[in-house]
Structure formats: structure tokens, C-alpha cells
Amino acid sequence: MARVRRWVWLVSLIPLAWLAWGAWQGGLGANPVERVIRFCGDWALWGLLLTLTVTPLRRIPGWSGLIRYRRMLGLSAFFYAVLHVTGYVVLDHFFAWQTILKDILKRPYITIGLTAFLLLVPLAITSTRGWIRRLGSAWQKLHRLIYPASVLVVIHYFMMVKADYRAPLVHAGILGVLLGWRVGWWLWHRQPVG
Ligand code: HEM
């Protein structure tokens, strides 16, 4: 189990290593700050979508072991979300808290991004075995926050795009399938999927 965790962590660090290499080579383009923020935002979203893919896939006979990867995938997604938000606070605004506060109040896509982030924080905190034990059945209920958080992230993506909606549409489609599968499961089995 510890080995699995280490592997998922190592693999999830590859995008960061790639970004660091790009920065080192001066290959982040004309607007490196934007590139860093977007890159980390993309990987955070992909991490969330991958995490949401585990449950449907593990229902395939013989694939139940996939559950071992879910926690680390979720944490990796959160790790990139933290980098994304840190990039915004540090690189974009250099801790100018007043400007950041104004941005949160004036730009709905930032407000929505922050809400999504705040929903993810309790999930990351309670991802340890100790919290799973302590919360019991409430743990699963709490972790359903990943659904509204992912929806808000996709809305955040839609709202920041100015003209070409293809990328957010593709992500919305994938999320729709992943959430739709859960609704289907619930309708069929009359209970939420575990
Ligand atoms: C406090 C919370 C957040 C803030 C302030 C924030 C800020 C931003 C900003 C400024 C951009 C546009 C970058 C640019 O064009 O320069 C952006 C894009 C994006 N953000 Fe966030 N964000 C937040 C939360 C999140 C979270 C939690 C996720 C995912 C888990 C996320 C995923 C994305 C994605 C996918 C994009 C689009 C990237 C692209 O264009 O390829 N954001 N965000």
C-alpha cells in the first residue's frame, strides 16, 4: 500500500517537474505567470476528473483494486489546486491582499474558483486514515463535496474563457458522464455508489 502511494505521488510530480524544466529552459512563453497558473489549474482539474473515474472503473469485475489509487489521486489534484492558487496569490498579485479581495468580490470566476477550492480543503484534511475512522459514515457524505467542487471548477473554467469554449466543453462533457453514471447507479440501485 505504501509502495502504491509512493508511485502515485512520484507519477503525479511529473507535470510539476515538466513545468520546472520549462521554467529553467525559459520555455514558458511570453506570459510565464499565466502559463504556470493555467498549467496547475489544468492538472488540478484533470486530477479531480481522474479521481472521479476510479469509482465507475472499480465496478468492472477484477478492477476493484483501483480504489487504492483514489486517495492519492485526490490529494495530487489538491496539490495542483494549491499550486494554482499560490501562483495566483504570489506570482500574479505578490500578496497584494486588498487587490486579491477586490478580485474575489468583483470577478465571479475568481469567487467561484475560491468556493471550489474551499470545498476541497476539508476533503484534503480528512483524507487520512484517522479521519476516516473518526468520521465513520459521515466521511463518505462529506467527500461527496467533490461533486459540487468539480462542477464549480468547470464553471470557473467556462467563465474565464473569452471566445473558444471547446476545452471547457470537453471537460464539462467528461464530468457530465462521470456524474451521470453516479445518478444512473443511484436510480438503478436506490442507493448512492460507495
Ligand atoms: C482561490 C481559488 C482560485 C483562483 C484565485 C483561481 C484563479 C484562476 C485564474 C486567475 C485563472 C486564469 C489564468 C489566466 O488566464 O491568467 C484560472 C484558470 C483556471 N483555473 Fe483557477 N482559480 C482558483 C481555483 C481553481 C481550482 C480549485 C481549480 C481546479 C481544481 C481551478 C482550475 C482552473 C482551470 C482548469 C483554469 C483554466 C486553465 C486553462 O485555461 O487551461 N481553479 N484560475
Image (spheres, rainbow, N blue to C red):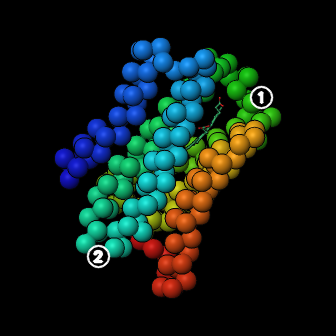
Residue underneath mark 1: 102
Foreground residue among 167 and 19: 167
Q: Which corner quadrant holds the C terminus?
A: bottom left
Q: How crowded is mark 2: few (under 14 residues within 10 Å), some or many (20 or more)?
A: few
Identified by mark 2, the residue type is Pro
- Left or right, residue 73 beside residue 4: right
What residue sits 43% from the left and 26% below the top? Answer: 19
What residue sits 60% from the left and 60% below the top? Answer: 173
Identified by mark 1, the residue type is Lys
Foreground residue among 134 and 174: 174
Whether ligand 1 has any atom under 8 Å from the Cβ at mark 1 is answered as: no
Q: Is residue 109 above or below residue 17?
A: below
Q: Count the marks: how many? A: 2
Foreground residue among 119 and 170: 170
What residue sits 39% from the left and 28% below the top? Answer: 18
- Left or right, residue 80 beside residue 103: left
Q: In the rendering, at what x and y percent does residue 62 appear?
A: 25, 72
Residues at marks 2 and 1 touching, judged by CB atoms closer than 8 Å: no
Residue underneath mark 2: 61
Q: What element carries label 2?
A: loop
Q: Can residue 112 be seen in this view?
A: no
Q: Residues within 10 Å of mark 1 (few under 14, many from 20)?
A: few
Q: Is mark 1 on a helix, strand or loop?
A: helix
- Left or right, residue 80 beside residue 101: left
Q: In the rendering, at what x and y percent does residue 138 appear?
A: 46, 65
Q: Can residue 73 be seen in this view?
A: yes
C-alpha separation, residue under disc 2 versus residue under disc 1: 51 Å
What residue sits 36% from the left and 53% below the top? Answer: 71
